[in-house]
Image (cartoon, rainbow, N blue to C red):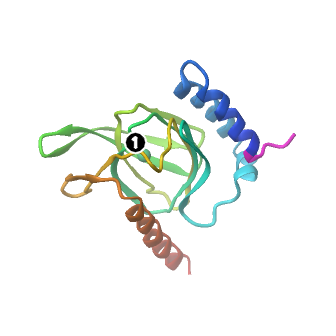
Amino acid sequence: MALDVEEIVARFERAVREHTPALAARDVLEELVADPAALERAVGTVTAGGIVPVHRADDLTILHVAWTPGMAINPHEHRMWAAIGMYGGQEDNSFYRRAAGGLEPSGGRELPAGDVLVLGDEVIHSVANSRREYAVALHVYGGDFFTVERSEWDPATHEERPRDLERTRRLFEEANTRWSARQK
Ligand SMILES: [Fe+2]
């Protein structure tokens, strides 16, 4: 049977019922990104950067994410575990710690296609796509990504503010406009 969205959701629904949901989700992601062609057929080919919800429940969110080339998203937290499975391109993660007056850098990790990264509840990260192709991934969260209150930080001043999904949507729009202008 060909892999489809229903099957992907079913696998993660089983994973979140396991004793260690984040690690079980990581295992599912590792299987999925090992066959990027099958995953792409299931979730669809990306033609623009954006975040497409695949599944949303109180204990599980699955997003199909494509970072546009040249795009950088500001530091933010999730307040729930997250697992990222890259199946095309690469995302560059930078990590931070809370510090007096904002944040301090705390290392980073390049995530090429085929890699899976698990982030604990407390992690603060920013993501950039420095390549000339979309960075495509499934992002899986141990809660409802869209309703939990959390913070983001100004990329320049590191000032903390409430997470603003509308601002994120505009970042995608601007990056997509820039990238499509460069393709002409
Ligand atoms: Fe994130």
Residue density around tag 1, few if under 14, some if 14–19, many if 20 or more, within 10 Å: many
Please identify the dominant SS of the magenta region. loop
Tell me the quadrant of the picture where the C terminus can be found: bottom right
Residue found at x 71% / y 46% = 39
Q: Disc 1 marks which residue?
A: 78
Look at the image and give the residue range highlighted in magenta: 1-5
The answer to whether mark 1 is within 8 Å of ligand 1 is yes
Tell me the quadrant of the picture where the N terminus can be found: top right
Left or right of 47: which side holds 132?
A: left
- Residue 65, above or below 21: below
| The residue positioned farthest toward the right in the image shown | 1
SS class of the residue under badge 1? loop
Name which quarter of the figure residue 9 lies in.
Answer: top right
- Residue 176, above or below 10: below
Question: Residue 75: horizontal and vertical position, in percent?
Answer: 32, 49
Residue found at x 50% / y 76% = 182
Q: Nearer the viewer, residue 112 or 137?
A: 137
Residue found at x 68% / y 38% = 32
Left or right of 177: which side holds 95?
A: left
- Residue 21, above or below 159: above
Question: Residue 129: horizontal and vertical position, in percent?
Answer: 45, 55
User: Total label count?
Assistant: 1
Residue found at x 46% / y 65% = 172
Question: Residue 102: horizontal and vertical position, in percent?
Answer: 18, 46
Question: Residue 107: horizontal and vertical position, in percent?
Answer: 31, 37
Identify residue type, mark 1.
His
Left or right of 80: which side holds 74?
A: left
